[in-house]
Image (cartoon, rainbow, N blue to C red):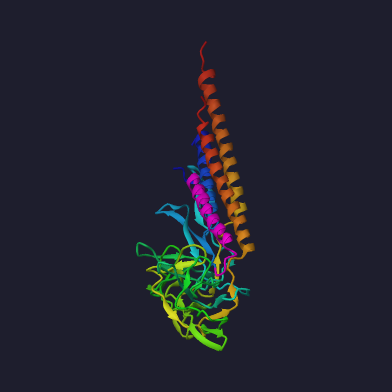
């Protein structure tokens, strides 16, 4: 295939993927605990013949801390530092999230918007209110006083960058990420849990909009490259006049 | 060389210029990409355009990720390619594996003196290339060129000026067109001399 045409076409395909990644970030920019992704690219190289285009390597999750913001929910939690809340679905399948916008279900467990339960915690029926301290200890207030009813552990991974995003702010463990270990929050250097707060997504809408503009223009520039290569072929074909 | 061969070499040269410009444009988002330059030369075989690696680096952009590393100054990261050989790259978007190895976006492990660099959990890279554990001790070192430093949380953009490359695309297209006109003109002259001048009535 024509080299210039091919290079420009790989550029268009790569920017297409770039746009999809940025669009996904923008769509989830309001989801608490959401982590944005970045598309990675590499030069396509033909052995001994130099570069022949580009290739999109796939999106890569950016596990940077989002800003913590006060929220209205009575069971809202935010993680300051590394780690994830471990949640389970109704079939017992585990997932990990930093979205701490939990609600109290009928059976006393804390569930997120998708119905995933926070593990190992059940709020007794008579509890009037609950509060969570920085070390994850959950205290419930009853008519006769306040009692600790459990402690929230966080899950940390040997290689969190290798977690697999499964939509929104949810992740699942992979062989590459390693198995999670339970970490108690509140230590000097470790993560802390903040009650009554939510972690905002780490996607900056302004930055994502700028990236979209950049990707669109790069796509157009590569499309022009395709046109120019095509035009050259047309001119070359006209050398032989009928 | 006759006129058609000269003009033909100009068409090939314009073609090469287009290939180089589209290659650069395609990599406008490739971190650490070094632009390919085009150098034209007049040789006994006509106009020839050669590729060469451009010096100079792209601007740094902030990502906030601890293992996104950008080199300020000369030099490059040494990674082990899939064929086992050491390869140089300035694309510093590394990911830490379970065993502590840092792998770039192509999955190639980062090397220091032929060994794979291992970063402890919660470890970080300081500006001198030292791999610092959570306890503050230096456990390894990423070799750097003299005077160069590392900035963690940054990546190096592609060193491609999209507008300049667009102009190169247009210039190559027009140059190709002009050379084609010359080829056609010479061809018409020859047609005339072969078909009309030598006609015997």
Q: Is residue A133 visible?
A: no
Q: Nearer the viewer, residue B186 or A17?
A: A17
**Image quadrant containing the N terminus of chain A:** top left
Asked where in the image residue A26 lies, by quadrant, the reply is: bottom right
In the image, farthest residue toward the bottom: A145
Give the tally of numbered discs.
0
- The answer to whether residue A229 is left or right of residue B103 is right
Which residue occupies 58% across, 55% down? A215
For the residue pair A134 and B186, the one nearer the viewer reads as A134
Residue A182: % across, % down: 43, 80
Magenta-drawn stretch, dominant element (helix, strand or loop): helix
- Residue A163 position in % (x across, y down): 44, 68
- B81 within the magenta span: no
Residue B176: tell me if it is visible: yes
Point 55% across, 88% down: residue:
A146
| Towards the viewer: A56 or A54 | A56
**Residue A125 position within the rendered picture, expressed as x and y whole percent measured from the top left:** 51, 79
Residue at the left extreme of this rendering: B83
Using the image as rendered, state which of residue B40 and residue A15 is in the foreground. Answer: A15
Instruction: Based on the picture, tell me whether residue A6 belongs to the magenta stretch.
Output: yes
Residues rendered magenta in the picture: A4-33
- Taking the spot 58% from the left edge, 51% from the top edge, the residue there is B165
Q: Quadrant of residue A33?
A: bottom right
Q: Give coordinates of residue B47: x percent, y percent.
A: 52, 44
């Amino acid at each position: 295939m024509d080299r210039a045409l091919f290079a420009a076409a790989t550029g268009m395909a790569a920017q297409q993927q770039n746009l999809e990644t940025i669009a996904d970030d923008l769509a989830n920019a309001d989801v608490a605990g959401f982590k944005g992704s970045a598309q990675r690219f590499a030069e396509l190289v033909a052995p001994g013949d130099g570069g022949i285009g580009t290739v999109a390597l796939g999106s890569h999750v950016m596990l940077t801390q989002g800003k913590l913001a006060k929220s209205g929910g009575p069971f809202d939690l935010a993680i300051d530092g590394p780690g994830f809340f471990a949640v389970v679905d109704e079939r017992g399948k585990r997932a990990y999230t930093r979205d701490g916008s939990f609600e109290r279900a009928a059976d006393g467990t804390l569930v997120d918007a998708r119905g995933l339960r926070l593990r190992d915690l059940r709020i007794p029926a008579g509890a009037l209110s609950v509060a969570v301290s920085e070390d994850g200890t959950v205290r419930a207030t009853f008519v006769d006083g306040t009692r600790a009813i459990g402690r929230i552990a966080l899950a940390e991974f040997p290689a969190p960058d290798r977690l697999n995003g499964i939509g929104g702010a949810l992740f699942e463990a992979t062989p590459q990420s390693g198995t999670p270990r339970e970490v108690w929050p509140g230590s000097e250097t470790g993560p802390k849990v903040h009650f009554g707060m939510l972690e905002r997504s780490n996607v900056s809408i302004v930055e994502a909009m700028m990236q979209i503009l950049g990707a669109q223009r790069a796509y157009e520039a590569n499309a022009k490259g395709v046109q120019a290569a095509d035009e050259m072929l047309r001119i070359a074909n006209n050398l032989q006049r009928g | 060389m006759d006129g058609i061969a000269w003009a033909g070499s100009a068409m090939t040269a314009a073609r090469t210029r287009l290939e180089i410009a589209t290659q650069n444009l395609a990599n406008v988002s490739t971190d650490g990409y070094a632009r390919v330059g085009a150098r034209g030369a007049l040789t006994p075989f006509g106009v020839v355009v050669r590729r060469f690696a451009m010096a100079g680096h792209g601007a740094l952009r902030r990502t906030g990720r601890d293992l996104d590393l950008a080199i300020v100054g000369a030099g490059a990261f040494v990674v082990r390619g899939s064929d086992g050989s050491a390869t140089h790259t300035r694309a510093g978007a590394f990911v830490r594996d379970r065993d502590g190895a840092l792998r770039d976006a192509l999955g190639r492990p980062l090397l220091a003196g032929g060994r794979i660099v291992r970063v402890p959990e919660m470890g970080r890279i300081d500006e001198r290339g030292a791999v610092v554990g959570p306890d503050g001790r230096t456990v390894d070192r990423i070799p750097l060129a003299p005077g160069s430093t590392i900035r963690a949380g940054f990546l190096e953009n592609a060193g491609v000026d999209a507008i300049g490359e667009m102009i190169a695309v247009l210039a190559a297209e027009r140059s190709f067109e002009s050379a084609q006109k010359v080829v056609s003109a010479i061809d018409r002259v020859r047609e005339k001399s072969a078909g009309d001048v030598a006609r015997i009535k």
